[in-house]
Structures are given as C-alpha cells and as structure tokens.
C-alpha cells in the first residue's frame, strides 16, 4: 500500500488558505501593514518567499506583483493582493473582490506638446507602455487603430529614442513626464489601487470569508474614529443628528444632573469640523480615539 502526503493544514485538519502578496514595492509594504492590523503574521525578512501562519490558517507567498493574478487565475493560489492595473493587464481568469484603499494611481496618455490635440489623434501612432493589455482594450473600446509597443519600464525615454510617438503609463504627480518634456493628453484611462482578487467563477476558498471580514474590519477602522462627548439632555437630539453612528450612538446618564455621555463612530474625514459643531451646541469633553479593528 502507498500513502499519499497530507494536504497542508493548520493543525485542525482544515486546509490552509493560500494567499499571494507582492514581494516588493509600495504595494508590498502597504499589503503587509493591513494584514498585520488584521492580526496576521508577516515576514520580517524581505528575502523570505513564503510564510506559514498556522494560528490563523493561512500561508502567504511573496511574488512579483505582475504574476499574482496569473497564479490566482490558474487556481495555484486561492486569493491575492495586487494592483487593479496589473489584474486587468494580465488577462488572467481572476476578478476583483474588494478595493483596499492604498496604492492609488491613474493611467494616462502622454506625448510631446502639440502631437495630440485629442485622443482621436492616437490613430496610427506608436504607443509605448508596460501595460499592453490595458492599452489595447482601451483602444479597442474607443475604436482607435494604433500600434502598441511593449516596454518593461522607463517608457518616458521611448519617445526621445524614437521608439514611440506616445506613451501610456501610471501617473502620480506628473513631474517625471514634465522632466521628459511630455504633457498629459485626454481623460484618465483607468484608476488603479490595490485590490483583493480571487479566481473567476471558482468556488469560494475555505477560510476566505473570515479573511475578507478581517480586512473589512481594518478598512472601516481606518475610515472611522470613536467620538465621546458630554451634552446637556435638552440638546441630545441635535447632537445625535450630527453623530448618528453606524447603528445608533450609545447614550448614558452622567452623575451630573441634566447631562448625558454620548459615544458614536464618526467618519475620520471632517471629524474636526464635527467637534466644532458639537461644541457649538453645548457639547463638552469631546474626545476622538483611533479604532484599530472592528467587526460590523
């Protein structure tokens, strides 16, 4: 008789959730940060290619960001974190499940001044890019016939070197393009950010719902603050209208007669103005506290 090797597990017999993460760059740093906040172990050495977190039933694999969608699409790994631009450019059988709010960028066309009066002028031009899939799809959707040249990086110099007439690339501040004597043309082709992906049309991997719920908890915690304040009873309704919370604020009586304490989750954006508004209607002892994680 021959025995087969047991499937990887977490000590309870359940299979590990296998997760692909970027191995370097800004996406890698931010992905590790959100996972640590969600309670998962992360590597301490950037040379590590994988990390086993048996306590949480997961195993992480650190891969080139451009390859992550391919591994997930083929079913080699269960889920992954990569850029939306890389997902769409890969053509892999993987799909976006959740935007993660970091690694934001915009994808634009650029050329020397006067070359493109409008996107219609792209017709017949040579366009250099590292994102051939994204550009070809955009051109096809717009009905524009142009030649797309694949370059792995430093596309800004391709025009100077005579390789291309136009470039299509990720733009953050646009300073690099200006230094190369180029100007941005047309609308944004695509807005990208880090996304959580799974295999298209496949069954949900075991343990995925818990993983996603943890990430959701961190994302909500990053967007909200806990606000506490004291308010006279006769102004409670006004105060609650300003801080309705997610469900309903907690209102508790104080030892001081005619006053109550209120606790509510409030959006981080505009929290300082909200404190001013509450103070204006009589609230005092107004406190803001960070939320590190939550479950809704």
Image (tube, grey):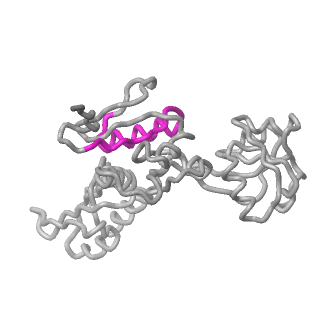
Report the residue at 69% width, 36% height from top. 152
Please state the extent of the stretch shown in magenta in the rendering. 15-41
Q: Is residue 171 left or right of residue 120?
A: left
Quadrant containing the N terminus is: top left
In the displayed image of the protein, which residue is found farthest to the front?
1
Report the residue at 40% width, 39% height from top. 33
The percent position of residue 250, horizontal first and vertical second, equals 20, 65
Inspect this view and state whether residue 179 appears: yes
Q: Is residue 43 left or right of residue 135?
A: left
* Residue 152 within the magenta-colored segment of the rendering: no
* Residue 32 within the magenta-colored segment of the rendering: yes
For this rendering, which residue is in front, 207 or 214?
A: 207
Q: Quadrant of residue 216?
A: bottom left
Q: Quadrant of residue 266?
A: bottom left
For this rendering, which residue is in front, 70 or 252?
A: 70
| 284 vs 69: above or below | below
Report the residue at 42% width, 25% height from top. 48
| 184 vs 53: above or below | below
């Amino acid at each position: 008789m021959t025995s087969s090797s047991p499937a990887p597990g977490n000590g309870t017999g359940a299979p590990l959730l296998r997760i692909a993460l970027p191995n370097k760059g800004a996406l890698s740093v931010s992905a590790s940060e959100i996972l640590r906040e969600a309670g998962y172990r992360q590597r301490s050495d950037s040379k590590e290619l994988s990390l086993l977190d048996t306590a949480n039933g997961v195993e992480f694999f650190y891969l080139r960001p451009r390859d992550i969608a391919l591994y997930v699409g083929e079913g080699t790994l269960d889920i992954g974190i990569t850029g939306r631009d890389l997902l769409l450019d890969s053509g892999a059988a993987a799909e976006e499940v959740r935007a993660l709010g970091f690694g934001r960028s915009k994808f634009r066309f650029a050329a020397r001044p006067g070359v493109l009066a409008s996107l219609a002028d792209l017709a017949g031009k040579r366009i250099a890019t590292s994102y051939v899939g994204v550009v070809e799809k955009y051109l096809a959707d717009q009905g524009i016939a142009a030649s797309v040249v694949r370059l792995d990086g430093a596309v800004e110099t391709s025009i100077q070197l005579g390789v291309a007439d136009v470039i299509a690339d990720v733009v953050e501040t646009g300073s690099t393009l200006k230094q190369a004597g180029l100007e941005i043309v047309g609308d944004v082709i695509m807005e990208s950010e880090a996304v959580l992906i799974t295999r298209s049309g496949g069954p949900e991997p075991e343990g995925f719902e818990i993983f996603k719920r943890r990430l959701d908890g961190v994302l909500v915690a990053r967007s909200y603050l806990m606000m506490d304040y004291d308010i006279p009873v006769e102004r409670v309704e006004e105060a609650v209208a300003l801080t309705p919370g997610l469900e309903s604020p907690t209102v508790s009586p104080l030892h001081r007669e005619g006053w109550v304490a209120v606790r509510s989750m409030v959006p981080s954006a505009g929290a300082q103005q909200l404190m001013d508004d509450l103070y204006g209607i009589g609230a005092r002892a107004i406190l803001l506290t960070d939320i590190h994680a939550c479950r809704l």
